[in-house]
Image: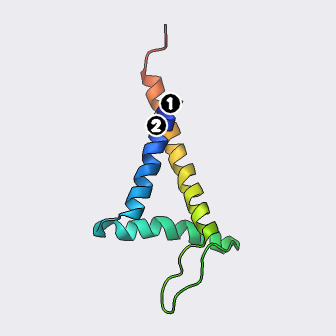
């Protein structure tokens, strides 16, 4: 369980840092990691976008940010669970 939590915390930290301080080369991917889940949630009818500036993309609403964080937390939890499960199989059982 400890490996899963450490890995999950590391992945979430990297997600936040790359989102907040995205290099130019990663900017389109990071925008996609925010807007693609929000577009799917908007299709369901949730108010995930705030007011749009004239001619621009609307930013996520507070609910939108919460749902994006929850989405990526769940994705990274799944990845961490798979990796820790694989790592646990390769280790010898405790004596």
Coordinates of residue 78 in the picture (x, y in percent): 54, 44
Residue depicted at x 69% and y 71%? 44
Residue 64: quarter of image: bottom right
The relative height of residue 80 versus residue 88 in the rendered view (above or below) is below
Coordinates of residue 51 in the picture (x, y in percent): 59, 83
Residue depicted at x 55% and y 51%? 73
Mark 1: give few (<14), some (14-19) or many (20+) Cα within 10 Å. few
The relative height of residue 7 versus residue 66 in the rendered view (above or below) is above
Q: Work out which residue is located at the far right of the displayed protein and give it.
A: 45
Coordinates of residue 2 in the picture (x, y in percent): 50, 30
Numbered badge on residue 2: 1
Left or right side of 29 for 53:
right
The relative height of residue 43 versus residue 76 in the rendered view (above or below) is below
Question: Regarding mark 1 in the picture, which secondary structure is present there?
Answer: helix
Numbered badge on residue 73: none
- How many circles with numbers are drawn on the protein? 2
The relative height of residue 36 versus residue 93 in the rendered view (above or below) is below
- For the residue pair 92 and 56, the one nearer the viewer reads as 56
Residue depicted at x 61% and y 69%? 62
User: Label 2: which residue?
Assistant: 6
Chosen colour scheme: rainbow
Coordinates of residue 10 in the picture (x, y in percent): 43, 44
Q: CA distance from mark 1 to mark 2?
A: 6 Å
Residue 43: quarter of image: bottom right
Pointer 1 with pointer 2, Cβ within 8 A = yes
């Amino acid at each position: 369980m400890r490996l899963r939590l450490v890995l999950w915390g590391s992945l979430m930290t990297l997600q936040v840092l790359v989102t907040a301080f995205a290099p130019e080369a990663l900017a389109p991917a990071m925008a996609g990691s925010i807007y693609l889940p929000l577009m799917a949630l908007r299709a369901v009818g949730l108010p995930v976008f705030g007011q749009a500036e004239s001619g621009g993309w609307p930013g996520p609403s507070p609910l939108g940010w919460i749902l994006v964080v929850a989405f990526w937390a769940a994705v990274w939890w799944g990845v961490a669970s798979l990796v820790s499960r694989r790592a646990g199989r390769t280790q010898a059982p405790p004596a």
